[in-house]
Image (cartoon, coloured by chain):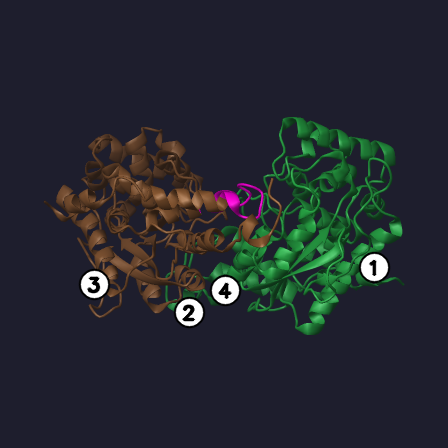
Chain colours: A green, B brown
Amino acid sequence: MSLLEHTISAIKETLNQEAFKAAKDRLLNQAKPAGSLGIMEDISARLAAIKGTIDVRLTNKRIVTCAGDHGVTQEGISLFPAEVTPQMVLNFAGGGASVNVIGKHAGAIVKAADLGVNYDFDPDLPIFHKKVRYGTANFTREPAMTRQEAIRSIEAGIEIVAELMAEAPVDLLGTGDMGIGNTTPSSAIIAAFSGIPVEKLTGRGTGIDDAALENKIRVIQKGLDLHRPDPKDPLDILSKVGGLEIGGLAGLVLGAAAHGIPVICDGLISTAGALIACELAPSARQYLFASHKSVEIGHKYMHDRLGLDPLIDLKFRLGEGTGAAVCMELLDLSTRILADIKTFEEVGVTNV
Amino acid sequence: MSLLEHTISAIKETLNQEAFKAAKDRLLNQAKPAGSLGIMEDISARLAAIKGTIDVRLTNKRIVTCAGDHGVTQEGISLFPAEVTPQMVLNFAGGGASVNVIGKHAGAIVKAADLGVNYDFDPDLPIFHKKVRYGTANFTREPAMTRQEAIRSIEAGIEIVAELMAEAPVDLLGTGDMGIGNTTPSSAIIAAFSGIPVEKLTGRGTGIDDAALENKIRVIQKGLDLHRPDPKDPLDILSKVGGLEIGGLAGLVLGAAAHGIPVICDGLISTAGALIACELAPSARQYLFASHKSVEIGHKYMHDRLGLDPLIDLKFRLGEGTGAAVCMELLDLSTRILADIKTFEEVGVTNV
């Protein structure tokens, strides 16, 4: 059995129903109108079911930002040049990027991972060194990667979770991405799964203009027409029009689910990875939380397909794990809401 | 000059434009796509303009939960009995309520204030003792309070800010409410200002059924028809169909604005108070942040009138300051985004 198959088979079919029921009971008896803390109550109950207790502690928070390059940038689909991908990986390692700042505020340790950056990093750079290849191929001409490379990228994500767990038990994992051009494969992935027209799923990425957006839509359509990825085969989609970091992001979700770790995905690219994971292993969805609603228009369709509602909409369109980092504080807070708000009985308030 | 007049005249007409421009410049030069942290960037720039620096520190956070009772509860407009108001004030003082738990997570000190609870609290109870009267009158029969009492309730909120500042400089103030029945005067206030039909502005509060909702709408309409409050006179509206805690909440906003403190308002009731404040002193709006979008349908119309977008929508309908407390973490985070994310130049990333 491969690492991927083994991991999928290790994901539980159902969460702890006893803890879930205990959580729901406590929430109903807390001295506040029933259900009045809305989505936070639902989250707290799901976390209780994942962890098997109503006093969940999300102490060790980790964010992994998966990076990869994209051959399709040759088609002029991004505002920024590809050289920015390795530059930003160095920025993550140096602690000065957006995800570092937001992760620090959330009490999370951020670490980047090279899944397929077109650059040789110093082996001593404190990142996960998991390069599968030096960026994908240009999918308007050939498949982005082979099926074996797609599996390898997912397994790299699974390995990262195992390596994190070997250091210290992870209580909450956030996923993030870096890869110039990677909204293009992400939109291609949701188009391939859903059959929704490409123009409804394609946004401006880092900020391209109308003409560049039209080109981007054409590029994605060309890739889909050339390769006709099988909507029932997530590995076929990932290999033909995906990205190496997107495979890594799928692996993070599968690895987290197999270890029983709640995992929160970021924007369009992280959610594309989460989608690949949940199409491979639907039970993984139980462990998955959608963080924010991106400005990227394809994101909504991914959430619809996953059946998840994002927690916040702050008009982010950055990636890196920034939205996941913001929402880590909300997941953390939800555990305190469940455990620490007193019941009517405990505080002597009249119930109705 | 009265305390109210003095406070209004102390609010600056404009914020620090130099700090605002410096913030905007830095945000544009940070190593990320321009504007990609959306609403958080806007908030951080406004906070910089309020505080006059791009390295804002929101260290001392305070939440004041203003409580009052409502004679209109005689009309059966609430699910919970009025005795719950003092019980919850005791719960706040004991630290076991929702706002205590969420406030603690946000690093804020929470303190309740008695503006008009129909109960005699022990003078040693650690709350702000600012009782104006033992609850409002039933506004379907007589004005909720006199004009002098309305002014007194606002001035009590102003005094609370001064007392907080005398203890330690407050960097961020959150407002919250407690008062069984107080969605009724809050909906009446926005109806009186806006002229929007009462049925469009009236929600289910703590969870009343269809028949009780119809009754609540009739009760509000009766109060408005009887007193015909002047939409151009916020004190007339507050005194005829308002609440004592709502006056206190208006005073908190005015006091904060006069001291140059950013202030974040909570749900329907806190925002009704903020609306009274900003109709009295439009410049106060510069210091005001809307936290969450409540399930209560009248809330949206208040935000529209204030010209503010709430930051989050977590389907809260609790009050107490819970939504304000959640958003304090976001305001805090925004200051770090502005000050700590490095620029393209600082980290050697290619700009476009």
Q: Alpha-carbon distance for marks 3 and 1?
A: 66 Å
Q: Is residue B31 magenta?
A: yes
**Circles 3 and 1: CB atoms closer than 8 Å:** no
Q: Is residue A146 above or below residue A60?
A: above
| Residue at numbered disc 1 | A4
Amino acid residing under circle 2: Glu
Residue density around tag 3, few if under 14, some if 14–19, many if 20 or more, within 10 Å = few
- The numbered dot on residue A346 is 2
Residue density around tag 1, few if under 14, some if 14–19, many if 20 or more, within 10 Å = some
| Residue at numbered disc 3 | B120
First to last magenta residue range: B28-43
Query: Which type of secondary structure does the marked residue at label 4 adopt?
Result: helix
- Going from N to C along the chain, the mark reached first, 1 or 4, is 1
- The numbered dot on residue B285 is none
Q: Chain of mark 3?
A: B
- Going from N to C along the chain, the mark reached first, 2 or 4, is 4
| Residue at numbered disc 4 | A336
Q: Give the quadrant of residue B239.
A: top left
Q: Residue B275: image x %, image y %?
A: 30, 40
Task: Kindly identify the residue that appears in the image at 73 percent across and 59 percent down.
Answer: A121
- Same chain check for tags 2 and 4: yes
Query: Which type of secondary structure does the marked residue at label 2 adopt?
Result: helix
- Going from N to C along the chain, the mark reached first, 1 or 2, is 1
Q: Chain of mark 1?
A: A
Q: Alpha-carbon distance for marks 3 and 4?
A: 32 Å
Q: Is residue B260 magenta?
A: no
Decide if residue A102 is in sight here: yes
Amino acid residing under circle 1: Leu
Q: Give the quadrant of residue B84.
A: bottom left
